[in-house]
Amino acid sequence: MQNILVINAGSSSIKYQLIDAERATRLASGLVERIGERQVGEVAAGRVKHEAAGRTLEWRTNIADHTEGFAQLTRAFAESGTPLGSLGIIAVGHRVVQGGSDFLEPTLINDAVAQRILELAELAPLHNPGHYDAIVAARAAFESVPHVAVFDTSFHQTMPPAAYSYAIDPEVAEKHGIRRYGFHGISHQVVSQRAAAVIGRPVHQLKQIVLHIGNGASASAIHRGRSIDTSMGLTPLEGLMMGTRSGDIDPGVLLHLLRAGYDADGVDKLLNKHSGLFGMAGSNDMRDVRQAAEVGDAAAQLAIDVYVHRLRHYVGAYLLELGGADTIVFTAGVGENNPGLRARVCEGLSWFGIELDPERNAAQSDTARVISSDGSRVAILVVPTDEEVEIAKQTRALVTA
């Protein structure tokens, strides 16, 4: 057995999956959430959910910190009849959102690496502190196996300076680490590789546009397997309209709001938590917004129109940057499950050689597939993403090298 425990932690949660990296199969998954929250009334604040072999375990308990969170994770495996010590775990792989310009590939975690991940919280205050807390707790809980950090930003570090630089004073940019880093890199990488396999061509021969469209959303231009541009920037806030994030916005809007009485935290909350689909239509779930639009809700319809407009904007930009495309790939929750959205994004693009097949697009499937017409010069695909399996593969490759 070459099993990898994959950890995707936040400030108040630990998502985990046990993956057989050799066979790319998922053996167990779970969630420890509401870490550090205070109990209200008689119901404990924390919640644990564990799924394995068709069986689900759930309970509530107060969870003070990530160390206690990992104790609950260990308990979950034990109570399901598969103690972690019996599962042949060879490493723990950690998803880390922000690696800055420091980490260009999966990295074995030592004290110095963990400390640098915490320092990079300046660029990802919503993510990296939770990653650090989980890394410290996990290394204490599983001290006999190596721990590996796999970074969401690594794949995009091949972008040229013209793509990652902002047009500000370079001394200010260097001092504060201000540049486009890009995110969802693990997904963009694995999806582009799987798309190449589906059409039977080497990834290093292809020009690809990948649209990762979920609650968080980003687009990327991939040339011969390397990212040359992406829509997210210094933070995951830039780019496409998302579930709760605004995406692209005039920086002058921020200054206007600050002068109007908002403080920095208020602007942060507005743009990250109360914008996007949620801000415009009252829900961050595209299914809810689509249903509202279908019964005549004007706000929901406008939200979808803006959403599609942003997607087409980036598709057009990347077609220009790449000099055409061999594939356009839809992935993540919305991209994989919304044929109507895919149709609107591809509408009227036949003069680029982009032609969707309506029947293929409408067919329900959870497998990677081509949805373009036989005559389309550009292959349009739907490819399910699986970041956890990719993290497990990259972790295994590093520790067994």
Image (cartoon, rainbow, N blue to C red):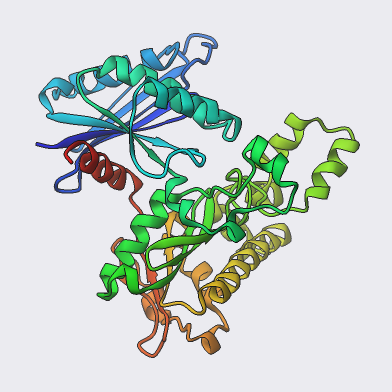
Q: Position of residue 74 (x, y in %)?
A: 25, 19
Q: Position of residue 245 (x, y in %)?
A: 63, 46
Asked if 251 appears above or below 137 in the picture, the reply is: below
Q: Residue at x 38, y 20 (%)?
A: 111
Residue 245 in view (yes/no): yes
Quarter of the image holding residue 172?
top right
Horizontal side of residue 112 vs 256, given as left or right:
left
Q: Residue at x 59, y 59 (%)?
A: 163
Q: Position of residue 265 (x, y in %)?
A: 73, 30
Residue reaching furthest front? 171
Quarter of the image holding residue 161?
bottom right
The quadrant the C terminus occupies is top left
Quarter of the image holding residue 191?
bottom left
Horizontal side of residue 371 vs 256, given as left or right:
left
The quadrant the N terminus occupies is top left
Looking at the picture, tell me which residue is in the foreground, 127 or 163. Answer: 163
Q: Residue at x 52, y 48 (%)?
A: 215
Looking at the picture, tell me which residue is in the foreground, 236 or 174. Answer: 174
Horizontal side of residue 364 vs 392, given as left or right:
right
Horizontal side of residue 322 vs 190, given as left or right:
right
Q: Residue at x 60, y 30 (%)?
A: 122
Asked if 111 appears above or below 189 in the picture, the reply is: above
Residue 365 in view (yes/no): no
Number of marks? 0
Q: Position of residue 326 (x, y in %)?
A: 41, 77
